[in-house]
Image (cartoon, rainbow, N blue to C red):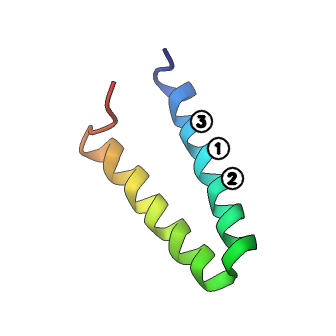
């Protein structure tokens, strides 16, 4: 099971791929909105220690 920095790197990579896909599929505005939501989600998951095990 992934833990620590490796889990964080995997999550960032998955969100980055999703952000690129949203940008290409739906354009700049939706891509940026998705990216902001994802960044807030990832930040809050780690700040509030909600990143499930």
Q: Which element type, helix, strand or loop, lies under badge 3?
A: helix
Q: Which mark is residue 9?
A: 3
Q: Nearer the viewer, residue 48 or 37?
A: 37
Q: Quadrant of the C terminus?
A: top left
Name the residue: 27% across, 39% down. 50
Q: Is residue 37 above or below residue 7?
A: below
Q: Which element type, helix, strand or loop, lies under badge 2?
A: helix
The picture places residue 18, in percent across and down from the top left corner, at 63, 56
Q: Is residue 30 above or below residue 40?
A: below
Q: Which mark is residue 17?
A: 2
Q: Which element type, helix, strand or loop, lies under badge 1?
A: helix
The tag earlier along the polypeptide, 2 or 3, is 3
Q: Is residue 51 above or below residue 34?
A: above
Q: Residues within 10 Å of mark 3 (few under 14, many from 20)?
A: few
User: In the image, 34: left or right of 14?
Assistant: left
Q: Which mark is residue 23?
A: none
User: Within the image, what quadrant is residue 6 found in?
Assistant: top right
Q: Residues within 10 Å of mark 2 (few under 14, many from 20)?
A: few
User: Which residue is labeled 1 in the image?
Assistant: 13
Marks 2 and 1 close (CB-CB < 8 Å): yes
Marks 3 and 1 close (CB-CB < 8 Å): yes
The picture places residue 28, in percent across and down from the top left corner, at 68, 82
The picture places residue 3, in percent across and down from the top left corner, at 46, 21
Name the residue: 49% across, 69% down. 36
């Amino acid at each position: 099971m992934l833990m620590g920095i490796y889990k964080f790197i995997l999550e960032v990579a998955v969100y980055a791929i999703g952000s690129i896909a949203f940008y290409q599929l739906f354009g700049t505005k939706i891509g940026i909105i998705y990216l902001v939501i994802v960044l807030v989600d990832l930040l809050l998951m780690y700040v509030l220690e909600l990143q499930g095990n």
